[in-house]
Amino acid sequence: MTLMASPAYAATEISSIIVFGDSLVDAGNIFASTGGTVPSPSLGYFEGRFTNGYNYPDLLSLDLFGRPTVASLDGGTNFAFGGARATTTSGVPDLAEQFGLFSRSGQPIDSTGLYILNFGGNDIFATLGAGAPTGYASDEAFLREAAALYAGGVQFLADRGANNIFITGFPVAGPGLTSSLQAEGFLTTELDRINLSPDVNLLRFDYLDFFQRVNTDPTVFGLPVDLNFTTACQAASALPDCTGYFYFDNTHPTAAIQQAAYSDMNRQFQFAAIAAVPEPGTWAMMLLGFGFIGSAMRSAKRRQKVTVFYA
């Protein structure tokens, strides 16, 4: 695997944004599936997001297309669900099930679309309780499976024609830092094994590195020097703007941190320089076999090394 300090992202246009992930990128699927009760607007959650504003895929979509992403249950291409995992263990649509929802939506792969994969946090949380997650011999075995499935999702999308794939790392710091670092190592190993064509741009963003840099000097990201990392905005009754707070609730970052993350991604991958193109009216059908994502992700052939553009 080649690590590039200054990634030369080759895409010159993005025609659509398709999102798979968890609460960090959910645009309202949990909100829609609970009849508009979770996450509760009365607690300051914004338009079905798990924070007080737009998340980073929304911000990218606003920059490119002038509108935020739309939850798949509302007819959009954001298939993320709060609580989702890379492993199929959460009870909400996880990675494999989200691919299945995408398949059943009738939307074929857009070769010039950007496919965002944002999983891992809830897999880390699953290892923080007493004993190993149900069905696994150890936390390590669980995290190895999570990393393998996560990387397998990249392979699966690429095999079906996706040329621009953005994947984030395991984001949990604090008590979950040891597990996150271990899982990051497993993910690096798994990504090094997958087999992608030269046409595929695989972009990887490191949440842990980003969080560390915010902690070291928040002013670099336009955040206040005295950014509060310990008290959540909700607990401090600082709604709705949450100025000066890292956490919105006890788990999710504020919209300001989402904006900072997007700015960091944009700086490193130059998304703002990429042209948006009209979403095509017709597509080449490339989704045959999407219903078999679970087994396909495990059995994908992995033969040659892959160049990954790292943030």
Image (tube, rainbow, N blue to C red):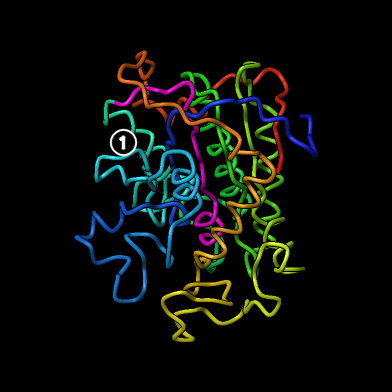
Q: Is residue 192 left or right of residue 92?
A: right
Q: Position of residue 2 (x, y in %)?
A: 79, 30
The residue under the point 54% across, 51% down is 120
Badge 1: how crowded within 10 Å, few (<14), some, or many (20+)? some
Measured from the top left, where is residue 99 in percent x and y?
38, 34
Q: Is residue 275 above or below residue 250?
A: above
Residue underneath mark 1? 101
Task: In the displayed orientation, state which residue is furthest to the top.
Answer: 284
Up/down of 286 relative to 225, above or below: above
Residue 173: x percent and y percent? 64, 64
Q: What stretch of residues is rendered in magenta?
A: 107-126
Residue 112 versus residue 305: which sits nearer the camera?
112
Q: Amino acid at mark 1?
A: Leu
In the image, residue 116 lies in the stretch drawn in magenta: yes
Q: Quadrant of residue 209?
A: bottom right
Task: Please report the residue visible at 53 percent of the width from the left and 66 percent of the height from the top.
Answer: 253
